[in-house]
Amino acid sequence: MIKIKSAIILCGGRGTRLGNLGKKIPKTLVKIHNKPILWYIVKALKKNSINHFILPLGYKGNQIRKYIKNDKDLKKLNFDLINTGLNSSISKRIFNVKEKIKSNHITLLNGDAIFDFNLKKILTKHYNKDIDITFLGCAAPLSYGVVGILKKKVASFERDLEFNSVKANKRRNFLGHIFSGISIIKANLIEKNFRLYNNFEKEFYPKIIKKNNTNFEEINGFWHSVDNEKDIKNLNKKIKNKIYSKVKKIKKNLLH
C-alpha cells in the first residue's frame, strides 16, 4: 500500500506585485520557460515522494482548476482543490483545508518558487525524529550594495549578492537564517484557533518554537522565488546566466 504524503501549496493570493500580469492570472500560473510555476512545484514534490497535493484556492482559482484538469501530467495526480474564499487570510485557508490532510505531517509551501534539492532526505529525517516543525532555509538575492570587510579592512563592493543569514542589531550572538517559505509541520498542530491568526508566521511559528521540538535545515540546492515582473523576465531571458541555465536544466529533468 502506498503511503500518502500530503502537501499544502498556498496559491490563493492576488499577486499584487506582478502588476498587470497579476490582474490576468494567479501568480502560481505565471510561466517560466513555458511552464507554470505550479508545474515545477508539483513535479518537484512528486520527485521527492510527496503524492497528495492540497490547493487552497482563492483569487482566480478556476484558472488553476482548469490548468490542472487539462495538463497531461498533473491531471493524473492526487489533488484536492478547495475554494477557501477570495479575501481569506493564509491562516483561514490552511485551516479550511485541514480535513483534507491525509498524513501525520504536512509539507507547507508557497506557490511562487521554483526549487531543486533533496527534500526527501529532509522529510525522512523529520519523520524519523518525530519533529514537530522543520523550517527550511535558503539563499536569496540582496538588492542592496554590500561592502565586504576582511580582517577589519574594506575588501570589496558587490551588488546582487546572495545571502542566507543575517545578523541583527543589538542582538549579540544572534544569527538569523533566511526562511524559504517551506516548512514540514505535524498536522495536529493546526488547531481550531489557527484560523484566528492575522499573520500565522508571526503568531503561530514563535508559539510552536517555544513549546515544541523544532528543527532547521538549509536547502542544499536550488531555490528561487518569483516575486515580481523583473524576476519573471530574468528567469525567461535567453541569455547566458546561471539562473536561466539552471531553471532550463531543472525543467528538462522534471519532464522525465
Image: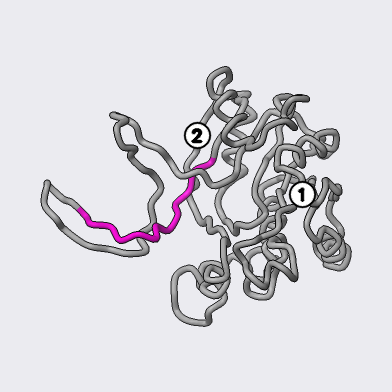
| Label 1 secondary element | loop
| Quarter of the rendering occupied by the C terminus | bottom right
Residue 211 picture location, percent across and down = 57, 17
Q: Amino acid at mark 1?
A: Asn
Furthest-bottom residue in view?
Answer: 238
Which residue is found at the position 65% from the left and 50% from the top?
110
To which quarter of the image does residue 203 belong?
Answer: top right
To which quarter of the image does residue 132 belong?
Answer: top right
114 relative to 106, above or below = below
Residue 168 picture location, percent across and down = 34, 37
Q: Amino acid at mark 2?
A: Phe
Which residues make up the magenta segment?
A: 136-148
Which residue is found at the position 80% from the left and 34% from the top?
98
Q: In the visual, does 2 lie left or right of 209?
A: right
Q: Which residue is mark 2?
A: 216
| Quarter of the rendering occupied by the N terminus | top right
Which residue is found at the position 23% from the left and 57% from the top?
147
The reply to whether residue 121 is in sight is: yes
62 relative to 202, above or below = below
Residue 91 picture location, percent across and down = 71, 37
Q: In the visual, does 32 lie left or right of 56?
A: left
Whichever of callouts 1 and 2 sits on the residue coming sooner in the sequence is: 1
**Is residue 132 found inside the magenta-colored segment of the image?**
no
Which numbered tag is attached to residue 87?
A: 1
Is disc 1 surrounded by few (<14), some (14 to 19) or many (20+) residues within 10 Å?
Answer: few
| Label 2 secondary element | strand
The reply to whether residue 255 is in sight is: no
